[in-house]
Image: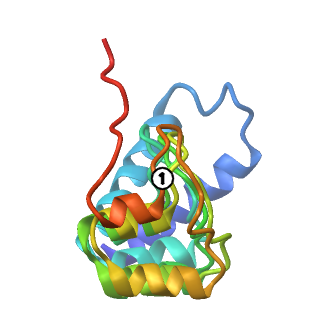
Amino acid sequence: MRTTLYALLLCITAGVAHASPSDTQAGPAADTQAQLRELFFQAARDGRQDMLNEFITARFDLNVQDEKGYTALILAAYHGQQPTVTLLLNAGADPCTKDLRGNTALMGAIFKGELSIARQLVDADCAPDERNNAGQTAAMYAALFHRKDVLDALAAKGADLDATDAMGNRVQNLERGEFQPLPAIR
């Protein structure tokens, strides 16, 4: 299985590098590429470092995104896969990439209470005040979910604790449990 996956990954990544956009839209190569992406994302969710190492060795794009904009790093962080987060970061995965809602791996880790992962991602080379599509920062997430040590680490990194999101929420209000929700979508 290992040699087969490695060979398949090499063929796909080489083919994609030289294919035109129309070549990747249909046909067997596109199907195989989609299957590989799904295997890649599932390996990140499950913490399958053996499989991820094959992708890394084959120089698979570590920052490829699924239909929701999730990367393997975002999925690993959200699912509490600390060793996988470390592996992906060390292999060059971009910790600053945002999903379609503008959330980063750090925001996902804070939300899920994966504090050791969140602390690791705070140390990544990303701006401490990255905002999602609602204007929220990681510090706002940390305040809202009472992740004091992560909030302190973000403050030490220079996070703006006076930033305001689209609804007027600020870190201080969120720490007290006072927040203005986003309007309902009708």
Residue 93 to residue 108: above or below:
below
- 148, 4: nearer the viewer: 148
Residue 118, percent from left and from top = 40, 79
- 173, 66: nearer the viewer: 173
Q: How many marks?
A: 1
Residue 171 to residue 169: above or below:
below
Residue designated by label 1: 103
Quadrant in which the C terminus appears: top left
State the image quarter where residue 74 is shown.
bottom left
Residue 49 to residue 28: above or below:
below
In the image: residue 106, left or right of residue 63: left
Residue 161, percent from left and from top = 56, 69
Label 1 amino acid?
A: Asn
In the image: residue 13, left or right of residue 185: right
Residue 19 to residue 175: above or below:
above
Quadrant in which the N terminus appears: bottom left
